[in-house]
């Protein structure tokens, strides 16, 4: 189900798109939702990030140790390490979606 709302973006140096409460309800989005954007024609498409639940108890000890090690090395949460891994995987495999 694709819904289209056209917005005019004003150049301020940052990208900020404001939605009315009705637009947010219509699109099924809420404050704090994250989006990626993809150029299309003379505009762009916003795609809402989805939530991915990972059962840590199903991961091997080696994988858990790697996640903790990367978390410590980068001084970020394990969740952020997992996000980076998933984002990299998606970027590397985007051509399969087309």
Image (tube, rainbow, N blue to C red):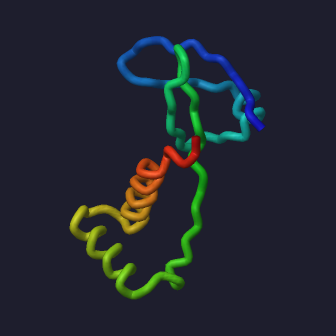
Return the x and y of residue 30 as percentages of the image width and height: 65, 41
Return the x and y of residue 67 as percentages of the image width and height: 35, 73
Return the x and y of residue 58 as percentages of the image width and height: 53, 83
Q: Would you say 47 lies left or right of 14 here?
A: right
Residue appearing at x 71%, y 25% in the figure: 4
Residue appearing at x 40%, y 60% in the figure: 85
Q: Would you say 76 lies left or right of 60 here?
A: left
Q: Would you say 42 lies left or right of 87 here?
A: right
Residue appearing at x 57%, y 28% in the figure: 45
Quadrant occupied by the C terminus: top right
Q: Is residue 94 above or below residue 54?
A: above
Q: Is residue 91 above or below residue 72?
A: above
Residue appearing at x 43%, y 85% in the figure: 60
Q: Would you say 53 lies left or right of 71 here?
A: right
Quadrant occupied by the N terminus: top right
Q: Is residue 73 above or below residue 37?
A: below
User: Looking at the image, which residue sits at the far left?
Assistant: 73
- Report which quarter residue 17 is drawn in: top right
Tag count: 0
Q: Nearer the viewer, residue 1 or 19?
A: 1
Q: Is residue 17 above or below residue 24?
A: above
Return the x and y of residue 5 as percentages of the image width and height: 69, 22
């Amino acid at each position: 189900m694709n819904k289209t709302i056209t917005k005019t973006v004003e150049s301020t140096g940052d990208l900020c798109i404001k939605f009315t409460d009705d637009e947010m309800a219509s699109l099924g989005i809420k404050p704090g939702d994250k989006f990626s954007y993809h150029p299309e024609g003379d505009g762009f498409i916003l795609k809402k990030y989805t939530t991915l639940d990972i059962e840590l108890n199903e991961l091997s000890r080696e994988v858990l140790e790697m996640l903790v090690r990367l978390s410590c090395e980068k001084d970020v949460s394990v969740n952020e390490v997992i996000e980076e891994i998933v984002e990299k995987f998606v970027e590397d495999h985007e051509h399969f979606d087309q």
